[in-house]
Amino acid sequence: MDITNFVVSARNQALLYGDYTTYHRLLAKKLHTSRKKLNIVTKNRSKFTKRGPVTAQQIAENHEFLHLILLTTERAWAHAMRLKAVHSADAKGITGRTRSHIISRLDKAARTAEHLVQILSDPSITPATDVDLLEARAYAAMVRGAAHFEGQNWEDCMRSYATARIIYNALLTPIKSDILKDLLSETIDPSIRYAAYQSKVPRTLAIPTIARKAFPASDEALVAQINKLAPQLLKQGDSDANEGQADAPNAPHSITWRSREVKIEDASIALAIASTESATARLAERLESSDVVLPKEMAGAYDEVLIASQDAADATKRAIDELKEEGVPQSDSRIQSLQITRTAVNYQMISWRIGRNRVLSDASLQKAKIEPPGRKVSRLKEKVVLYDATLQSLESIKELPGVAADDGLLQQLQATTKYFHALKCLSIARSHSLLGQSSNALALTKHAHDQCLQSATFFSKHGASSSDSPILNIDVRQADIQFLQNLLRGELQKCRAIVEIDNLREKAKSTTPQVKIPLVDRLREYPAEGVDLENMVDYPPRVQPIPVKPLFFDVAWNYIDYPGKPPVATADLEEEPAPTPEPKKKGWFGFGR
């Protein structure tokens, strides 16, 4: 019969594009169509004839009668929800005739749903299975719980919703649908928690425990049907730890954030934190084993921890929203404690998210193999995307409550951001190197080196993590900083050398002479374009001028016979009289006395 899917899918489809008014109008049309199929519709200008309730025999003959009951129930429920939504903004709230009208509509819906349970209970007439009967009972209990909720009958409300929760939990195994999970988390569990609060039930009790205590165990037929599907659901004992009992052995009673300890009063938060700690222990065991080799497998080991930490964050937010809906002021100690808990669990969740990104981007975990430059550039782009996600996660931490006022934490986050920013710049620089853009690679490597140096300076003063655990998270270890600093120092020198060689090559190309100069005449130059072994010296050698002092030529002129030089007698040179010196003039410009 699929009662739950029929109801919930109709609600979701109508509320996705409209509100309860739209849903109420749509149900009226569907009811008219259903009556036409059953040939019981009142024709135009005909006298209305009141018909009796639907019987089990009619449902056995035609399942459209089942849809008729469900549509009638939903129309009354949607009418009540429409009235509640219209008057929710009233200054005095929903009071007087409006509340009475809402309660009467919900009571009609509950009576119609309970009538469906009654006529399906006879297996000799209707072909309903145990699952169909349980679905009808859960639906009727949920609608009756809504009527008690508006009537502020908190004990009865808690009992009705507890019945619906236990039944739907038992139906999770045979139905295996996400619709039941959404119904439990979005409708039933918040109603149980609010009714428990109004009934003065301690918040340290988890919702499964409250539902188990409020469940009407005196209904032996219902208990037998539930035990048939889920034998351990109603039993006390070891299942409490798995289903959310606050006093389970592994459930923490307090949480510490930045040297401040607060108590955990909400059981769902305590169990979610305990689940995170258990998942962390399993993660450490898996990473230390030899089975995990590839980075993707190691990153997959983080998924369980991420899911558990996300559940803790959601449970904290849900607890804060519930207190705000109850009118608890922001200055209340419970709100303040939950805000601290929210910051702590969200910081932990972001830390695990960053750790997963670090595992995926860790180059040391990848096997060395020869790849084309295009494939290497693609891998570097994937790393840059992971580093961007890490930097965005670090920025999101600053938006958590209380972080903006914590100067020490902000400085630590800034240093951590510079560390990951240096890794991102290094990956981009390597991609530029693969593409032959050495100048861009040098500039990016220098920027990465400066960022890493600033991060290392902060952590050297305030201390970095010295843990050698294989689990990676937001904490930057001293070994990681030292390794990156040494790597960037070497990369910087390498990039400078490559840029210098490229500059020499460009200079050599622009100043290439027309005449090829032999190697022996260019020994003072670095052969950037390579050595031409066929042009080492000029052979045969040609006459070339060489630099010689002028005095040498004057002496050599007298002793060397050059072609075309007239002979000069040595005796004549020796007997030649010395020239007579001219008289020295006196005065200005030779005009003197």
Image: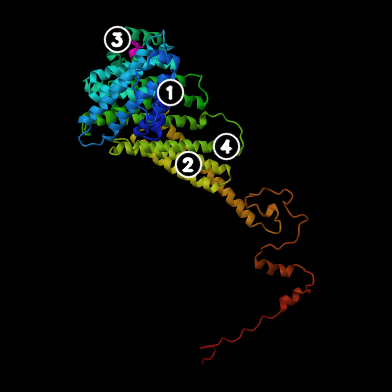
Circle 3 is placed at which residue position?
217
Q: Residue at x 37, y 23 (%)?
A: 183
Q: Residues within 10 Å of mark 1 (few under 14, many from 20)?
A: few
Q: Which sits earlier in the primary sequence, circle 1 or circle 4?
A: 1
Q: Residue drawn 45% across and 29% down?
A: 356
Q: CA distance from mark 1 to mark 4?
A: 71 Å
Q: Height in image: 79 above or below 580?
A: above
The residue that mark 1 highlights is: 39
Nearer-N-terminus badge (3/4) = 3
Please state the horizontal and vertical placement of residue 53, each as a whole percent of the image.
Answer: 35, 18
| Nearest to viewer (mark 1 / mark 4) | 1
Q: Earlier in the sequence, mark 2 or mark 3?
A: 3
Q: Earlier in the sequence, mark 2 or mark 4?
A: 4
Q: Which numbered marker is on residue 376?
A: 4
Snapshot quadrant of residue 262: top left
Comparing marks 2 and 3, which lies closer to the viewer?
3
Q: CA distance from mark 3 to mark 4?
A: 65 Å
Question: Along the polypeptide, which appears first: circle 1 or circle 2?
Answer: 1
Residue kind at label 4, given as amino acid type: Lys
Q: Residue furthest bottom?
A: 593
Report the residue at 71% width, 56% height from top: 516
For the N terminus, the quadrant is: top left
